[in-house]
Amino acid sequence: MSFKLFVSDIDGTILPAGKEMPEKNIEAIHKMVNAGIVFTLATGRMYSATLPIARQLGLNVPIIVYNGAAIKTVEGEIIHAEYLEPGLVTEIIKFFREKNYYLQTYADDILRYPFKGKYSDLYEKALKISGVNSGWDGLLEQTENVCKLLSITDNIDETNKIIAEVKAEFGDKVDSFKSADQFVEIVAPGVSKASALKVLAKKFGAEISETVAIGDSENDIPMIKAAGLGIAMGNATDDVKAACDVVTGLCEENGFADAVYKYVLQSEKK
């Protein structure tokens, strides 16, 4: 099978936790691009937190951010964007405020949170970015151009509880899911890494059968199911492995590069 578009998750897929991107992964990506395959990153991260990783590749690749709500190039061109309706953002912020749950926003790609503490610190440290302590009223003043909202919890049980409450309160006005055990994602209906994959496939003239997607977490499942070839990392959750076509090695053991050579370039790793 000849592929034209390869979509990759970042954390736990091409980027091991707390480490730089392995050179073997960068080499595999360059070999795909040299073979005429469009490569793109797909992440729940905000654009500014993704850009340094994309720049390591030395390529002006498309970047799918906010779990598919926006697609931009390394040079900053907006290819696609889907924003939550401002009035709805206001409702969600008020709902989280009343429940005393943590919630952060990304209006105009600026991280804002209602109070500084363990959740904001965890996020800023993990993504190596700085946000703005806006207070709840500050969040309510910035409801335009919001691609997604994110709540952070202490554990997966709290995450699942909040997701259930969001779905009960807002129904089909939003899509809510977890991207990690502690992360509750809220985006516009129909937004996912899969929807972004389809946008890029159309843009670059690729049939869905000519696309590849690889990832390790629950928010990767839609694109893994949608792609012509869906690959799960060896460290992926059981749900991701159940949704994929093939499973590669662990992120820490160059599973990404191995998958590129075996399933896309059909060659041995050099």
Image (cartoon, rainbow, N blue to C red):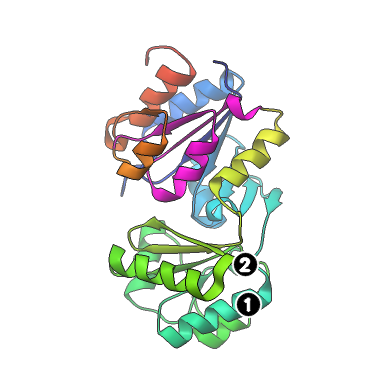
Query: Which quadrant of the view contains residue 39?
Result: top right
Residue kind at label 2, given as amino acid type:
Val
Quadrant the N terminus occupies: top right
Q: Which residue is mark 1?
A: 142
The reply to whether the magenta stretch includes residue 231 is: yes
* Position of 60 relative to 128 (above/below): above
Q: Look at the numbered disc 2 and give the secondary structure of its residue.
A: loop
* Residue in the picture at 63% in, 77% down: 142
* Residue in the picture at 59% in, 63% down: 109
Q: What percent of the width, then of the height, locates residue 57? A: 51, 35
Residue 146: give its label.
2
Q: Is residue 137 visible?
A: yes
Q: What percent of the width, then of the height, locates residue 185? A: 47, 62
* Position of 198 relative to 38 (above/below): below
Q: Label 2 near label 1: C-beta < 8 Å?
A: yes
- Characterize the local packing of mark 1: few (<14), some (14-19) or many (20 or more) Cα atoms within 10 angstroms: some
Specify the segment rendered in magenta. Answer: 207-234
Quadrant the C terminus occupies: top left
How many discs appear? Answer: 2
Q: Is residue 13 visible?
A: no
